[in-house]
Image (tube, rainbow, N blue to C red):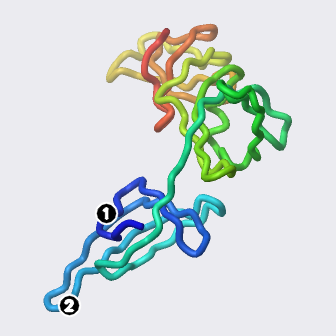
Amino acid sequence: MIDVNQLRKGTIYLEDNNLLRVLDYSHNKTGRGGATIRVMVRNLRTGSTFERTYPSGNRIEDVRLESSDVEYLYDDGEFLTFMDQETYEQPQLRRDVFGDDVRYLKEGSKLKLVRYETEIIDYELPTSIDFLVTESEMAVAGDTANSPTKKVTTETGLVVQVPMFVKEGDTIRVKTEDGSYLTRV
């Protein structure tokens, strides 16, 4: 059990058999009354986001999470299959768990799966991933003012804004946090 004053962004706790991750935290102190802790949380099982308010001094149940390094194997249309690097088990997750982040997955890429007891509840992508450019817009001659960019499509279907010198067949490094171009590899 932890005090609600210890809640911070990223903290995961259990309430009413729901695993909740803190997205935003604020401590509010009124003139004479006690302080209140207001947190925006996301239910890790359902994906819903909502706000909770707790009086200062309340206690909540914190959880211990385990993470395992896995390698992405393949997508069968409904499930994504991974292989645990230590036990060689092959856990599967529904494709919709990843949402748009599925475009960052390519065969052989490594990531972490986060578990609570035996249930996989979350994932952590690496900070950057290298992709092969499969489609590229043509660069326009003379269009060099103000560091121009163009759109390219990678092998996984991810569309990235890149500098004009990147062409089809190049390998680029993309930041997974926001999908931005980092460098040509």
Of 172 and 80, which appears nearest the observer?
80
Determine which residue is flagged by label 1.
Answer: 6
Q: Quadrant of the N terminus?
A: bottom left
Q: Residues within 10 Å of mark 1 (few under 14, many from 20)?
A: few
Asked if 75 appears above or below 3 in the picture, the reply is above
User: Alpha-carbon distance for marks 1 and 2?
Assistant: 20 Å
| Residue 47, position as x, y percentages in the image | 61, 61
52 in relation to 13, above or below: below
Task: Give residue 76's position: percent from left, percent from top.
Answer: 85, 35
Left or right, residue 185 beside residue 131: left
Amino acid carrying label 2: it is: Gly
| Percent of width and height locating residue 69 | 59, 30
Query: Which residue position is annotated with label 2?
Result: 33
Query: Dot 2: within a 10 Å radius of its alpha carbon, few (fewer than 14), some, or many (20 or more) residues?
Result: few
Amino acid type shown at disc 1: Gln
Comparing 167 with 123, the one in front is 123
**CB atoms of marks 1 and 2 within 8 Å:** no
For residue 158, what is the image quadrant? top right
Q: Work out whether mark 1 precedes mark 2 in sequence or the reverse, and give the earlier one.
A: 1
Front position in the image: 175 or 60 = 60
Q: Residue at x 26, y 71 (%)?
A: 27
